[in-house]
Amino acid sequence: MGTENNITPDFTWDTIDTVLLDMDGTLLDKHFDDYFWEQYVPEHYSLMHNLSIEEAKAELLERYKEVESTLDWTDLNYWSRQLGLDIPELKIRINHLIDVHPYVPDFLHFCRNNEKKVYLVTNAHSKTLAIKLEKTDIGHLFDRIICAEEVGMAKEDVRFWEGLQNLIGFEKKRTLLADDTEKVLMSAEKYGMGLLIFVARSSSRKPVQYSQKYPSIEYFKELIP
């Protein structure tokens, strides 16, 4: 991915009935998650195990990679057990960093006003979801909220989309999915999802990275006519 040759979304809203939206990095600023897992957790882990912060970071990043793209990666109970830390409590301590990306409420209202079915579809654990929805107050703007644990597998697995379709029912060719993870868009593409949008500005603290494979946006205002 790079910042050149961005593919712009090209569609009309009368071809879309259903909108599926990821949470972290898509609707919410991923700075919270990056800081939490890459800095805040290693700091606490280093104190517990008498390591330098750099040593703790190196160890934890390896452990994160081992379960990437699985339900364990986002399972707060799993990490609490693995690391001996109260992960939900640590998240609550820095919940002031949780923030909604600009123009997200406008986009959600646009979808609802135009009678689109709108679903939040996230790999995030239900405990994480509860913390973030309490802080952001956008939960009421969705027809339904689905965590991957409810489906039984992560969104990177193509079988997730079949499970989701069984849960909520949608015509995949008339469905828009926006996500900041290309692996997720690739699994949805394999399933035959109609319109895939990559969110290139997942974190307010990191450079924009456009996808070279999927139409990309920085902000959701780009999808509002």
Image: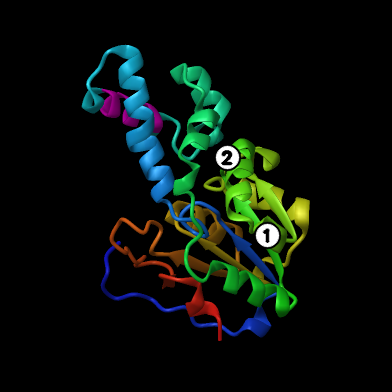
Give the structural element (helix, strand or loop) at label 1. strand
Is 218 on the left or on the right of 51, as rendered?
right
Return the residue nearer the eye: 133 or 223: 133
Region in magenta: 56-64
Kind of residue at disc 2: Thr
- Give the image location of residue 84, x and y in percent: 47, 16
Q: Residues within 10 Å of mark 2 (few under 14, many from 20)?
A: some
**Does the magenta run of residues contain 11?**
no
The dominant secondary structure in magenta is: helix
Kind of residue at disc 1: Tyr
Question: Which residue is at a point 34% across and 67% down the rendered structure image?
Answer: 212
The quadrant where residue 208 appears: bottom left
Question: Which residue is at a point 28% across and 61% down the rendered structure image?
Answer: 207
Is 75 on the left or on the right of 53, as rendered?
right
Question: Which residue is at a point 28% across and 29% down the rendered structure image?
Answer: 57
- Give the image location of residue 3, x and y in percent: 27, 69
The residue tagged 1 is 119
The residue tagged 2 is 128
**Does the magenta run of residues contain 60?**
yes
Give the quarter of the figure containing the C terminus. Answer: bottom right
- Give the image location of residue 119, x and y in percent: 68, 59
Picture layout, residue 80 above or below residue 40 = above
Picture layout, residue 131 above or below residue 162 = above
Question: Which residue is at a point 33% across and 31% down the rendered structure image?
Answer: 61
Return the residue nearer the eye: 163 or 210: 210
